[in-house]
Image (cartoon, helix red, strand yellow):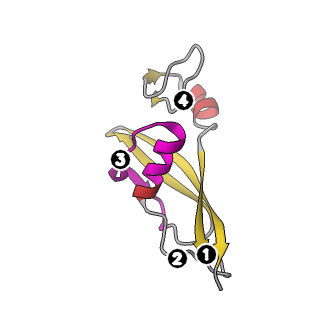
Amino acid sequence: MKVILFENLKRIGSIGEIIDVKRGFARNFLIANKKEFIVKKLSTENKELYGSVKPTEISKLIQESEKLDVKPSMIQPVTDIKTLGKFKVKISLHSEVDAEITIEVQSAETIQ
C-alpha cells in the first residue's frame, strides 16, 4: 500500500514522501494516528455556526499548523460543516491516494 507522509517519522520517511508499506502497518499505525484540527467559529446558543467551515479555511489551517501545501480543491468535506462538533474531511492527495482528517469545530463565542 502506498501512503504519503504528513509528518516526519524516524526510520520511515519525511513529510510529503510516498512510501510503500504493508497494509496492516498503514491501517494500524499510520492511519490510526491521523491528524485532528481545531477550528474556532462564532456560534449561536443552539450550536449552529454563522456561515460554515469552507475548504479554503481548512487548507489555511493545515498550512499554518503542519506546513503542508494542500489546495482547497483537494479538500472534500463528507458533510457541510455548519454546526459545532467533529467532522470527517477527505483530502485527495493524488488520483489514487486519499487521506482523511478530523475537523473539530469549537465555539469561539456565543452570540444571542
Q: Position of residue 108 (x, y in %)?
A: 64, 67
Q: Residues within 10 Å of mark 2 (few under 14, many from 20)?
A: few
Q: Earlier in the sequence, mark 3 or mark 4?
A: 4
Q: Earlier in the sequence, mark 4 or mark 2?
A: 4
Q: Earlier in the sequence, mark 3 or mark 1?
A: 1
Which residue: 48% across, 27% down? Answer: 15
Secondary element at image label 4: loop
Considering every residue shown, the one lying at the far top of the view is 11
Q: Which mark is residue 71?
A: 3
Q: Earlier in the sequence, mark 1 or mark 2?
A: 1
Q: Report which quarter residue 76 is drawn in.
A: bottom left
Q: Nearer the viewer, residue 29 or 101?
A: 101
Q: Which mark is residue 43?
A: 1
Is 60 above or below relative to 84?
Answer: above
Which residue: 52% across, 38% down? Answer: 66
Residue located beneath label 2 in the image: 50
- How far apart marks 1 and 2 lie (CA) works out to 6 Å
- How far apart marks 4 and 2 lie (CA) works out to 33 Å
State if disc 2 and disc 1 touch (CB < 8 Å): yes
Magenta-colored span: 58-80
